[in-house]
Structures are given as structure tokens and as C-alpha cells.
Amino acid sequence: MTIRVALVFGGRSSEHSISCATAGGVLAAIDRSRFEVVPIGITRQGAFVLEQDDPARFRLDPEHLPEVVDNGTRVFFPESAESREFKVAEGGDELRSLGEIDVVFPILHGRFGEDGTLQGMLELVDLPYVGNGVMASALGMDKHFTKTVLKQAGIPVADWESVTAAEWASDPESCRKRAARLGLPAFVKPARAGSSVGVSRVDRREDFDSAMDAALAEDKTVLIEEAISGREIECGVLSGRNGGPTRASLAGEVIVSDGGFYDFAAKYLDAPGVELACPTELTSAELAELQTLAARAFDAIDGSGLARVDFFLTADGFVLNEINTMPGFTPISMFPKCWIASGFSYQSLITELIELGLETVR
């Protein structure tokens, strides 16, 4: 029996184009013999529109950042938990049925989608969906609370300070003093953004204020984090099947040329100076520790479906950097690379995620 999948992408966050590129990857690779796709785009203004089922339309390159444009259609989700029927309005008041949807595959990155907001809407109407639930999504999106929970769970994290927009406006000197205890270099990040949007590496005190301004343009809370010296190691995580234990992939490594860091261009535009090595070289003991820590972190936030867990491997061991509850899924992204190295194909990984979404009890 064909499974009908609503693929939801785009959204209001600064990661809109990355979500579209992820949609392109999924549309190109999904097993059409098993799944019928209903592509639903969310414009930058938050309108739900019926999109084209055309992977090429969402190709990501330096000359073309894909986006969902308002084509005049409007997609309507089920009115209650008694139905799974989606409808669309196309230029008039009359609604056309899109049929029943078996599972929603939300591939939104950043706020207003990866942060539990869309997941909450889906749970209100009892729709099965792929990925993390409300709490794990909200926790994973907010770097301050992720660190707070993981530290409580005994998982090593980098030292940090969190500064709100109100604190910065009322007493910037106090904020500068709090940041100073972390030393230089330091990283200044929006608390709730991804894909390195709004992230700055601060090597000089005089650059701190501009870094704060860049981060506050993305969120009302800023995370100031000590720089950790070590290898950047990443691990993919999947829920276990049928109640089994959390699974962790082989390790990938981000290798950055001197003086750079893994920014937006490096992650998604294949910029020079960055190499993604997967699998990377670790001892058997290091790999076992990495996989154990990644699974523990996923379980600590009550994760479900998938995540990518990022670490630094220092002279003293692993330090967790962050958890991505809807990691990039473009052809050059680390999450699929790690699982392909672990035995999945890109297509079978998509199938696995959909089946996990159908299996998960909310």
C-alpha cells in the first residue's frame, strides 16, 4: 500500500533556503514505489502553499538560494483529530481535497518549525510525524537549555554565558565582563538559530559588540561560549526500532583550514577550506565513547526519530557542542554522510525516518 507523505519545508526562519534544499534532496531520493509525496511549502511570511514536486527547483548553489514563493494556493490541515484529510484552495473560495495523509515529514530548520511549534500543531490534530516531539525540539533549538539539561545529565559541555537583549541594552558593560571570563577566542551565537546564521568568532575584545549585534538580529538571547580546542567530530543518531535502544552512526569529522570555522557557506555552499571526512579515524575506544555520549544526549532530551550530535575531541576527551534535532539533509550534509557510511543509502535513510515517524507513539 502506498504511504502518503506531506513533506513540509521552507518556513519563517533565517534557515528557509536550507530547508528548501533539504526538501530538494528528499524529493529526488524518496522511494516513489512506496511513498506518494504532497509537497507543502511555508513562505517566509508563514503561508502554507501547495508546492511543485520538482527537486531541481530547490537546488542550492551560490548563485541561487531556493525559496518558497506565494503562488496563491493555501493548504489547510485537518480540522480535528477525527480526520487526516488535507485540503487546498487554489485561487478561489472552494476547497479541493488533497486526500488523507498518513504521515507528515517536517524538514524545517530553525525557529517556527524545528523548535516544537509545528510539532505541537501536528499533535493537536493527532497527525503522525517524522522526528522529534515538542519537548525535544524545543530543548534542542535553545542552546542555553540544551546545555543546562546535558550538564545536569553529566555530559561534558563547553562553558558559556547567556545574555538577553534586555540585559545588553540596560547594562552592556556587565555583559562584557561576564563574557571576558570565558577568554579569547570565544563564539557568540543566537541561542535559537542554526546553520551558523548569526554566529561570530571573536578574537579581539573590540569585535565583541558587533558580534552581539549580529546574534541579537536572530534571537533575543545570545550564547557566549568558550572556544574549545579539538577535532570537530559529529555523529548521527536514530531512534531504535520497536522500542529498541538509540542507535548511533560512525563518526564524521569537520576539518577546517587554519583561521576559519564551519560557517554557513562551508556547510551548504561547498566553500573551500573545509572537508567533511566520514568515516573519520578514531580508536575503537573513542568511537564507542562517542556513540555512547551521543545516544545519552539524545535520550536526555527525550529525542525521537533523528538528530546529529556535535562534539569536540580534546586532549581530555569529548565535549558536546550541540544537538541538531532536524539536521541538514542536503547531499553534502554530515547527517546522511554518517549514516551512509554506516550502511544506509540516502533513499533507505529517508524510508527509515518515515517508518520511525509512523511507529512513534506521541
Image: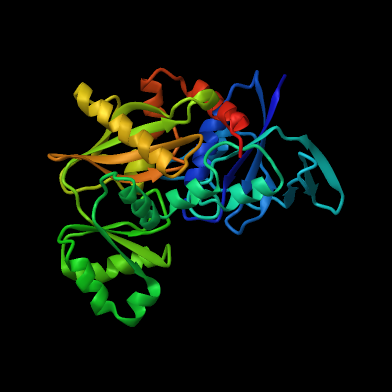
Rendering quarter of residue 278: top left
How is the protein colored in the picture?
rainbow
Q: Return the residue found at the far bottom.
A: 170
The residue at the point 73 percent across, 46 percent down is: 77
The residue at the point 73 percent across, 52 percent down is: 72
Vertical placement of 85 versus 289: above or below?
below
Vertical placement of 241 versus 65: above or below?
above
Does residue 269 appear in the picture of this structure?
A: no
Rendering quarter of residue 332: top left
Image position, residue 78 (x, y; %): 76, 45
Q: Return the residue found at the far left.
A: 315
Does residue 320 appear in the picture of this structure?
A: yes
Is 326 left, or right, of 206 in this rendering?
right
Quarter of the rendering occupied by the N terminus: top right
Image position, residue 143 (x, y; %): 37, 54
Image position, residue 129 (x, y; %): 61, 38
Quarter of the rendering occupied by the C terminus: top right
Q: Which is more toward the observer, 150 or 273?
A: 150
Q: Which is more toward the observer, 213 or 354?
A: 354
Q: Return the residue found at the far right.
A: 94
The residue at the point 42 percent across, 62 percent down is: 218
- How many labels sit on residues? 0
Is 138 left, or right, of 256 in this rendering?
right
Vertical placement of 167 versus 14: above or below?
below
Is 152 left, or right, of 257 in this rendering?
right
Vertical placement of 129 versus 341: above or below?
below
Image position, residue 249 (x, y; %): 36, 26
